[in-house]
Image (cartoon, rainbow, N blue to C red):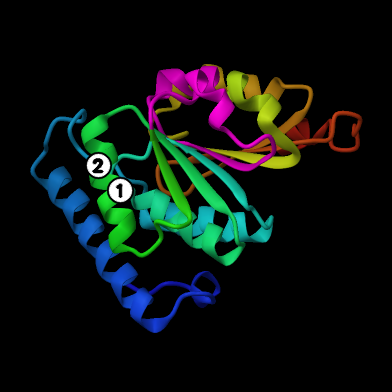
Amino acid sequence: MKLNIVLIDKITMSNFEELFQTLERMQNEDAQQRLDKLPREIRWRSIDRDTAEFITLFARSINARNIVEIGTSQGYSTIWLGLVAKANDGKVISFEIDEKRVIIAQSNIMDAGLDQYVEIIHGDPRENINLLPKSIDLLFLDAEKDDYLAHFIKLFDNIREGGSIVADNAISHFADLREYINHVRLHPQCNSVLIPLGRGIELTLKRPINDSSLAPWNDLIR
């Protein structure tokens, strides 16, 4: 496994080796769980490697500093986002409702040497709005699919104009996310598109409130 040099421009070679080993171990653990056909509720359910690379490069392209993740699991995607936070002198706040996973993720984040740039909170972000940045650059949704829409509605005001929302599993769980996808595509302040990468990504842009220049965008690309 190789990491794009853009993502490691502020990481020393010693830290890179720790990071490399941590991500490889986590990938292998997730793959083995899938091979063993463990029940969905106890598997890590990490994002695909291609999805991780896309999200981190996209986050770098928008110079994301305030990053919020909903659904930490064991911290695989959190580490990738942590790379962006380190490169941009920012921070990742990741929410996880399973206390055991919080402990495991915190250990993995430390192994990757990114604990200064990542904070994992045990709880639901909808109940901890006061802990969120007032201006979120990137919101990554990878929690229970039935909750995506509720998270979006609750956190929308905290996302800065020009910020983005990335929702995973938009193809693999399309039926579960249909209401969410319809909502963001019809939202008067959003433009959104489905990216057929990994298990599917719904990428949504929050437009400035008075900017109507991209209003017909979704109609054009459907």
Q: Is residue 179 above or below residue 116?
A: above
> Which residue is rendered at x = 71% and y = 21% of the image?
186
> Which residue is rendered at x = 56% and y = 24% of the image?
129
The quarter of the picture where residue 175 lies is top left
Find disc 2 in the rendering and name its residue: 103
Q: Is residue 158 magenta?
A: no
Give the distance between the C-alpha atoms of the residues marked 1 and 2, in whole angstroms.
Answer: 5 Å
Q: Which residues are magenta?
A: 122-151
> Which residue is rendered at x = 63% and y = 53% of the image?
65
Q: Is residue 3 above or below residue 75?
A: below
Q: Is residue 112 above or below residue 145?
A: below
Q: Position of residue 211 (x, y in %)?
A: 90, 34
- Secondary structure state at the residue bearing disc 2: helix
Indicate left or right for 64 with 161 as reference: left
Find disc 1 in the rendering and name its residue: 106
In front of the other: 106 or 166:
106
Q: Is residue 130 magenta?
A: yes
Q: Amino acid at mark 1?
A: Gln
Q: Amino acid at mark 2?
A: Ile
> Which residue is rendered at x = 68% and y = 34% of the image?
134
Q: Position of residue 75 (x, y in %)?
A: 33, 48
